Image: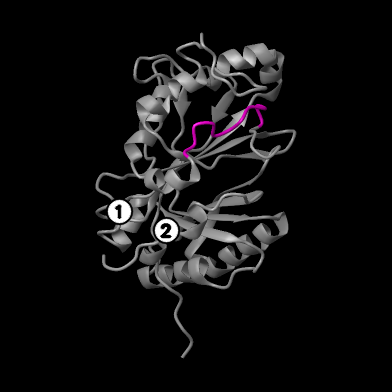
Amino acid sequence: MTGLVLPQPGVLALGTSTQTYLELDLADQPEADDLVAAVAEISGGAMTGQGCNVVVGFRPDLWRRLRPDGVPEGVHGFDEPVTGPDGFTMPATQHDLLVWVAAGGRDVVFDEAMRVVRTLGGLATVADETTGWTYHHHLDLTGFVDGTENPVLGAAAELALVRIGPGTGGSILLLQRWDHDALGWEALGDEGQARVMGRTKDTDEELADKSPTSHIARNDQDEVGQILRRNIPYGDLREHGTLFVGLSARQQILHEMLRRMVGADGGGRDDLTRYTTPVTGAYYFLPAATDLPTPAQDA
């Protein structure tokens, strides 16, 4: 690749209060040219004009088929469940395409998501849809700060974006929906919740005597590697939880975090998994904006 490489703008764009993640499955063997044209329209077509970002992602093998040199070596889909020694399992629900729409209002996100569906037409169908919203600025629905170990904005690009070789400027995204057992969680009280998390709820301080199976101990990024989290709460009173959105230049970091959470490394299962259950799991490659096709110009 020559020239300036730019990521898709929405990958690092923070501050949007509403987000929708559309996971889509392709129709039987669509023509590659038709798919490329539709993706070009989705990623580069007219925006709503209200601060809306649209990010397009692909099942790694699909993007590799469309652009053989466009994905780092070894990057793969979430093709098999991740299971711990006690049988706790993170399911594999891989789809073909991801369209991530983020904006400051639910109406804008809805309109843009509808444009995506119209543009794809018969090429793909929506297999799963999750809409999230910010909760008290920076909390998840456990009441704890989410993304405590996130890098400062200036360093986020170095961790989230591929810096050299195939797929430069792109990012690997791990997407999981985690359903919360809200009543079980609330029954623990603040002290019990702090022991599960390994840090305090009110001041977000790490516990000096935290359990080795606490959430932050099992996800210690000093040991596993740093990622950029773009998590967001979703749902309503009947069913709600956290949409885990992890971005990294290295898939190995993301996958090792999952293995540690289920205890597959021998270190014990993450205590938080006693109160929240993964129901989806997929990896998508988010190509650089400069690698995506551009909309055809009218003659």
Q: Are marks 1 and 2 in contact (CB under 8 Å)?
A: no
Query: Where does residue 274 sit, x and y in percent of width and height?
Result: 56, 18
Say which element carries label 1.
loop
Residue 118 magenta-highlighted: no
Mark 1 or 2 closer to N-term? Answer: 2
Q: Locate residue 22, reporting x and y percent.
A: 55, 53
Q: Nearer the viewer, residue 101 or 139?
A: 139
Q: Which numbered circle lies on residue 7?
A: 2
Residue 38 against residue 174 in the figure, above or below: below
Task: Name the amino acid, label 2.
Answer: Pro
Residue in front for this viewpoint, 157 or 10: 157
Q: Is residue 195 above or below residue 128?
A: above
Element under label 2?
loop
Residue 207, quarter of the rendered image: top right
Q: Residues within 10 Å of mark 1 (few under 14, many from 20)?
A: many
In the displayed structure, would residue 155 be above or below residue 255?
below
CA gap between label 1 and label 2 equals 14 Å
Residue beneath disc 1: 71
The stretch of residues the image draws in magenta is: 141-151
Q: Is residue 115 visible?
A: yes
What residue type is disc 1 on? Val
